[in-house]
Image: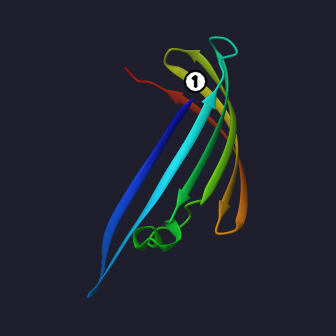
Amino acid sequence: MISEIYQFSSTIDFNTIQKSGNFSAAYLQTEYHLNHRWIPFARLESSFGAKDDPYLALLSGLPDQTAMLGLRFDANRKHAFKIEYSSRVFSGEHSRLWSISWNAVLP
């Protein structure tokens, strides 16, 4: 199991006005090794206080919450393939996404 919590603080200058804010983000991920190649995993991500943060107000497309399920296949020590399904919440709106990726380590 892997977990992290981040605390962010920022001050943004809007012409002559300064706005300060802070928010937190966290995730929890668990995985299970079926064998040395196949690894199913699940991940939950969330942010706290992000709606009122002036820094995040400059960005668009960041989800408030994400739930993800996936399966990774480790082809060898330097190559892995993943298929993931995620459900994301953006200001009350839901989005679902399937993704397939290949990850490689270059020498």
- Position in image of residue 83 (x %, y %): 68, 34
Q: Is residue 4 left or right of residue 66?
A: left
Tell me what residue is drawn at x 30 percent, y 71 percent.
Answer: 11
Tell me what residue is drawn at x 41 percent, y 73 percent.
Answer: 54
In the rendered image, the residue lying farthest to the left is: 16
- Position in image of residue 43 (x %, y %): 63, 40
- Position in image of residue 81 (x %, y %): 62, 27
In the rendered image, the residue lying farthest to the top is: 36
Examine the image and state in which quarter residue 74 appears.
Answer: top right
Tell me what residue is drawn at x 47 percent, y 67 percent.
Answer: 59
Question: Where does the C terminus fall, quadrant-wise?
Answer: top left
Question: Where does the N terminus fall, quadrant-wise?
Answer: top right
Q: Is residue 53 left or right of residue 67?
A: left
Residue type marked 1: Ala
Tell me what residue is drawn at x 64 percent, y 15 percent.
Answer: 37
Examine the image and state in which quarter residue 40 appears.
Answer: top right
Q: Secondary structure at mark 1?
A: strand
Examine the image and state in which quarter residue 85 appears.
Answer: top right
Pointer 1 residue = 80
Pick the front one: 30 or 61: 30
* Relative vertical location of residue 53 with respect to residue 42 in this rendering, above or below: below
Pick the front one: 8 or 82: 8
In the rendered image, the residue lying farthest to the bottom is: 16
* Relative vertical location of residue 47 with respect to residue 85 in this rendering, above or below: below
